[in-house]
Structures are given as structure tokens and as C-alpha cells.
Image: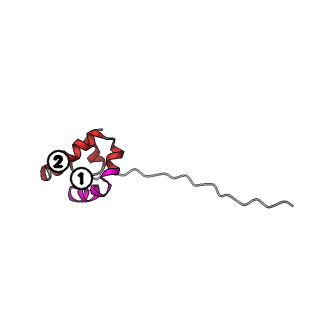
Amino acid sequence: MTFEEYLIGKKIDGAAFQATEPALWNEWNKLFEQMSPASFTSQKLYLINPIRRKYHLKVEATETPKLIVAAKPVMKPKPKMN
């Protein structure tokens, strides 16, 4: 996974982020290359949301698939036999 793919997954516009804050983008890119995405997320957990709010990725609206949920069977209590 590349840093750009990671940013898309986090709904961050990588191009706008890189153009506006190149030093921070380069720092994060170098760190991301050195560790796993989960470790990077853990390390930058409280910094990702402010960046996401600044550089929110515009996603085109597509038709959302309808989720079909199966009903759970109702469990009836068993009577006690003494």
C-alpha cells in the first residue's frame, strides 16, 4: 500500500495536502514507508482527523447498495424440569 492509497482510505485529498503542507506531507510519507499502515495510524491517531477535516476527499455520490440483514431466530427459554 502506498501513502497515496492510505490517504484515500482515510478520505484525505493527498494532492491538496501535499500542495498546501509539503513539509508535513513529506515527513508523513517517509514515516509511512518505514512502518506498517496500522502502526502509522496508531502513531498519528490524533493528527489524522484534523488533516482529514482540512483536506476532505470529495467522493462522488454513487448508488448505495441495500444491505440485507437476516432476522435472528427468537430464543425461547426452556422450562425447568425438577
> Does residue 64 show up?
yes
Range of the magenta residues? 42-56
**Mark 1: few/some/many CA within 10 Å (<14, 14-19, 20+):** some
Q: Main secondary structure of the magenta part?
A: helix
Side of 13 where 70 appears, left or right? right
**Callout 1 amino acid:** Leu
Front label number (1 vs 2)? 2
Residue 6 position by quadrant: top left
Q: Nearer the viewer, residue 10 or 26?
A: 26
Query: What residue did someone put label 1 on?
Result: 57
Q: Answer yes or no: do the residues labelled 1 and 2 have beta carbons within 8 Å? A: no
Q: Tell me if residue 48 is in the magenta stretch.
A: yes
Residue type highlighted by circle 2: Ala
Q: Is residue 58 above or below residue 3?
A: below
Q: Position of residue 26 (x, y in %)?
A: 18, 45
How far apart are labels 1 and 2 at the CA level? 10 Å
Q: Secondary structure at mark 1?
A: loop
**Residue shown at the point (14%, 49%) measured from the top left:** 22
Pinpoint residue 79: horizontal percent, then vertical percent: 79, 61
Q: Earlier in the sequence, mark 1 or mark 2?
A: 2
In the displayed orientation, state which residue is furthest to the right: 82
Taking the spot 28% from the left edge, 39% from the top edge, the residue there is 34
State which quarter of the image contains the C terminus. Answer: bottom right
Is residue 73 within the magenta segment? no
The foreground one among 14 and 36 is 36
Label at residue 15: 2
Q: Position of residue 68 (x, y in %)?
A: 49, 51
